[in-house]
Image (tube, helix red, strand yellow):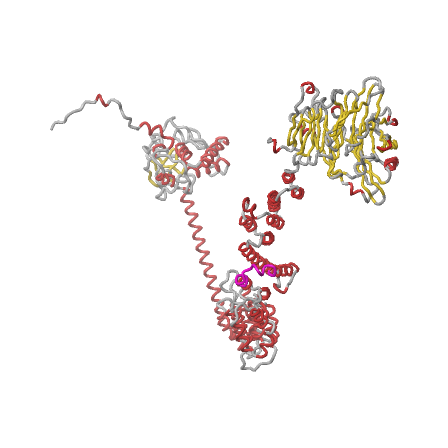
Amino acid sequence: MDHARQVFTVDLLERYATKGRGVITAMAAGNDVIVLGTSKGWVIRHDFGVGDSYDIDLCAGRPGEQSIHRVFVDPGGSHCIATVVGAGGAETYYTHAKWSKPRVLGRLKGLVVNAVAWNRQQITEASTKEVVLGTDNGQLYEIAVDEKDKREKYIKFIYELKELPEAFMGLQMETASLGSGTRYYVMAVTPTRLYSFTGIGLLETVFASYLERAVRFMELPGEVPNRQVELHFFIKQRRATHFAWLSGAGIYHGGLNFGSQHSNPNGDNFVENKALLDYSKLSEGSEVVKPTSMAVSEFHFLLLIGNKVKVVNRISEHIIEDLHFDLTSESASRGIIGLCSDATAGLFYAYDQNSVFQVSVNDEGRDMWKVYLDMKEYAASLANCRDPFQRDQVYLVQADAAFSSRDFQRAASFYAKVRSTYINYILSFEEVTLKFISVGEQDALRTFLLHRLDNLTKEDKCQITMISTWATELYLDKINRLLLEEDSAVENHGVEYQSIIQEFCAFLSDSKDVLDEATTMKLLESYGRVEELVYFASLKEQHEIVIHHYIQYKFAPDLIALDAYETVESWMGTKNLNPRKLIPAMMRYSSEPHAKNETHEVIKYLEFCVHRLHNEDPGIHNLLLSLYAKQEDDSALLRFLQCKFGKGRENGPDFFYDPKYALRLCLKEKRMRACVHIYSMMSMHEEAVALALQVDPELAMAEADKVEDDEDLRKKLWLMVAKHVIEQEKGTKRENIRKAIAFLKETDGLLKIEDILPFFPDFALIDDFKEAICSSLEDYNKQIEELKQEMNDATHGADNIRNDINALAQRYAVIDKDEDCGGINVEAGADGSAEESSMTDHRGADAAGNSKKVRDFSSKDESSRMVSVTCSGNELVCRRKILNVGGDYRISRGYTSVGPIAPFYVFPCGHAFHSECLIAHVTRCTTESQAEHILDLQKQLTLLGDGARKDLNGSMFEDSVSSTTNADKLRSQLDDAVAGECPFCGELMIREISLPFILADESREVNSWTIKPTNNLLNLRSISLPS
């Protein structure tokens, strides 16, 4: 690692620091002062602040060898406590920086002091205030020393471990001044436990309270090399912020929050974010190596392992550096003994038997933002950033993480925080916007743009204008989407809708100076946002637009009342006017009486909106329909109802008015023809016909004829009309019956006389509908005759089928005795044709082998089969005689032999094949699955044993040829598979036309025909031809 980039550096501070007073056994530091304890009982003090150094002999007057066990220095470097152990027992001394002689603490005689906790908040150069000492026998003492008194003020026993007596190995203390007194926080460690004490009042009182309540502790069993259990606080601005305990199980560490205990006098838990660093993370191999000493910095642990110090980041728990020391030959055997820290000076020290090394810190927090960022602790990462470039990287990672988790609004805010220079270097502005567009997050995109605007400076005028314009369009798009989601459009002012309107107006107000006036006006106008257009016009001081708006809408009722014609003409000449906002004015005008011949100006304007402007607002269409319904002439109303306003639009409605409202209105105004049309339009055909019969039977017939896809409903509607015609009151019953008979002709045969007979009166002359009855009977007679003819045809066809079956039973073919396998020389018999292939039994063959008649036992359908393997014709047959007698042929599996003649097939085309030859050919040339099927059928026939097999003498078993045993079924399936068509005349041969003459597996034969060049050209003699 580059030395300049190292966080911790090691320098030799003093090579022979003990001045010949023995070897170093203990060391402490504070405020640029280090105190060394030696193996000969000397305490050596080096004050680097003033460049002073002196030593004190603590074994003077003590018999035998004496050694310094521990030395302790307060954070100010003035007070020192040291424990000497030797043959005469243990003694503890106190000395001050201004004293030349130490003061023995007689009350502690015989006790080995392992730990000291200084009162960092209250200690001064003149007084130690309260100091807590931990001994080897598990006891705690409180002492206080004033420098002017040259002796201790008091030494008090305050606590002893009863449950598990162990030596106190480390002590730390913090205090906080409260209105009710001083709160003490004390942490103490033994080889296996970490104890926490806290309380308000005197220190003695605090520990006395634990006689009645349990002590809070954390137990971590395990052994530490040389019993070097340590407890460290990291001090920042005279206040401990976190701690670390070097235990046998690992480094137990966490944060300290002393303020959280102010409200609870008995609350012992002032530790937070606790964690345990396992020693296995420090080992390079499988063997776990434990540290022998430790020091704690703001972000790191310095762990002494062997003769080097491993620097471990306490947040990520990763080793970042290894520190090595320049040891002398006499010190190399024991190596580095321990570490200590100077919290006041921010320095660390390491020492061996003779030398002292200084470990300096070089900006250890410079890369902590990366550590926290890798752990996804973004707030901590930002808190440790040193410059905008680092913060931009954190924002970008936060944004990407939020985008991946689909928290797009949060991602947008973080993307916007990244500075333009950095985001253009890593991720361009366009790429960020495309990310949101690709996932359809318009709201998040708008958020990103608005935050970007906040981060731009006044010099970026062009970019500000473009982004503001884009944000304006996104606001308008959001408003439109909210309107489309609401059933009642603008009237339904939901909370979100009102909120976005207010936000948009505030944006327009803030951006009025940077938005292009013409472009913004066009956008607002294109989206139909009249109110926002007027608001923006007022911001831009375009008073003409504002006045025009108020004239058009606010004063519209008064204007149309004063001069309807001029007002409507003005409306019709104004673009982008919202007719819906003029409805109150139009309704007020329509409620007033008008002359019959007076042009209804509102109807004129509404017709203009509907037909010319293609307005689709239901309110406009409903208002126009209501005005039509109130007119005496309903022709305009009927034309309006019949007009399809949505025609030409894919999946568009045919009308935009409310049909239920239109029906109620027309019933109220007694516009029955209009009601019939609305019923029909709503597919309520029965109601439409019933109402039409009250108005005009011709209208009812027209409505009944509209139903085309439902024959039953259409017939029902026509019956309604027929019943009405017969039962109507006008005219005599006889005349009505005649009308009904004539009415039948108009139904195009849908209704017959028998359908309307139930409507006739009980006593009616048959003369009136005799012709209709006769005609109906004639129709039935024709239908009966047609059915008879169909039955006769079916009977005749059945007879033909039976005759064909009988003829097939007697079918045979004649084969010449010299006929070859695969040859053609067959005479048809019986019906003059050999239509299908057959398996033969050779009954009636003579001994000489003359031509024989072969009887067909089964007929097969000639069906197409897919052939995927090519075989040439000369590979098909054996070219031996079909009727050959001899042992050259084996009986094919599943077939019956007839004497010594092998089984064979005869096809309608005249080709004949041995069964074995045909099966072999088809198996080679058909598909793999079909070949497996044929072989499987043969195998099954062989296993079953052919029940109809003939013996060599020509006799048959008792089973009939027409038997339906399993063997017969399998044999029939095999015949279908191999003899469905002639292999020479069927599709099998036709498909071979497109295949090559030479197959892929015939390469050897192809090579045999290759003409090879010869090398004997020199031996050839030239022959001259005679001229």
Q: Is residue 297 left or right of residue 927?
A: right
Q: Is residue 476 above or below residue 545?
A: above
Q: Is residue 456 left or right of residue 345?
A: left
**Whether residue 762 can be seen here:** no
The picture places residue 874, in percent across and down from the top left corner, at 34, 33
User: Furthest-left residue in view?
Assistant: 1027
Q: Is residue 986 magenta?
A: no
The picture places residue 173, in percent across and down from the top left corner, at 80, 35
The residue located at (58%, 52%) in the rendering is 456
Query: Considering the image in quadrants, where does the C terminus appear?
Result: top left
Q: Which residues are magenta?
A: 508-521
The picture places residue 401, in percent across and down from the top left corner, at 61, 44
Q: Is residue 520 magenta?
A: yes
Location of residue 284 (image quadrant):
top right
Q: Number of labelled discs?
A: 0
Closer to us: 921 or 594: 594
Q: Is residue 802 above or below residue 952?
A: below
Location of residue 71 (image quadrant):
top right
Q: Is residue 832 above or below residue 282?
A: below
The picture places residue 877, in percent across and down from the top left corner, at 36, 32
Closer to us: 489 or 908: 489
Query: Considering the image in quadrants, where does the N terminus appear?
Result: top right
Closer to us: 894 or 990: 990
The residue located at (64%, 33%) in the rendering is 7
**Whether residue 761 can be seen here:** yes
Q: Main secondary structure of the magenta part?
A: helix
Q: Is residue 396 above or below residue 1003?
A: below
